[in-house]
Amino acid sequence: MHRKMTITLDEAVYDGLYRTVGRRKMSQFIEDLLRPHVVDTSLDDGYRAMASDKAREAEAMEWCNALVEDMADAAR
């Protein structure tokens, strides 16, 4: 969902933005610049990259299964 917002810019900044990206692309340009600073997706990206590493996932599963076996042998 998109929300509409009004911002105030110095005239020189607005003119430069208009010349650089064009009138119809300003919102997307600003959103692309701001997103990494206000939306924390780095963890999601990192987890996604780790999950796609099949060898790493197999090693992690082996490690988890070994822990389960160790816990089954532990006295309660």
Image (spheres, rainbow, N blue to C red):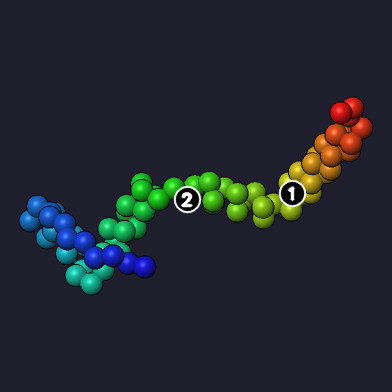
Residue at 67% over, 52% down: 51
Find out whether the residues at labels 2 and 1 contact each other: C-beta distance under 8 Å.
no
Q: Amino acid at mark 2?
A: Thr
Q: Quadrant of residue 30?
A: bottom left
Residue at 12% over, 54% down: 9
Q: Which residue is mark 1?
A: 57
Residue lying at the far front in this picture: please name it.
76
Residue 15, labelled with which disc?
A: none
Residue lying at the far left in this picture: please name it.
11
Q: Quadrant of the N terminus?
A: bottom left
Q: Quadrant of residue 74?
A: top right
Tag 1's secondary structure?
A: helix
Residue 12: in sight, yes or no? no
Q: Amino acid at mark 1?
A: Glu
- Please indicate whether residue 10 sits to the left or right of residue 39 in the image: left
Residue 36 at what x, y percent from top left? 39, 49
Q: Which residue is mark 2?
A: 41
- Give neighbour class at mark 1: few <14, some 14-19, many 20+ (Cα, 10 Å): few
Image vertical order of residue 66 relative to residue 49, above or below: above
Residue 3 at what x, y percent from top left? 28, 65
Q: Quadrant of the C terminus?
A: top right
- Please indicate whether residue 40 sits to the left or right of residue 45 in the image: left
Q: In this view of the protein, which residue sits in the foreground, 33 or 76?
A: 76
Residue 67 at what x, y percent from top left? 82, 36
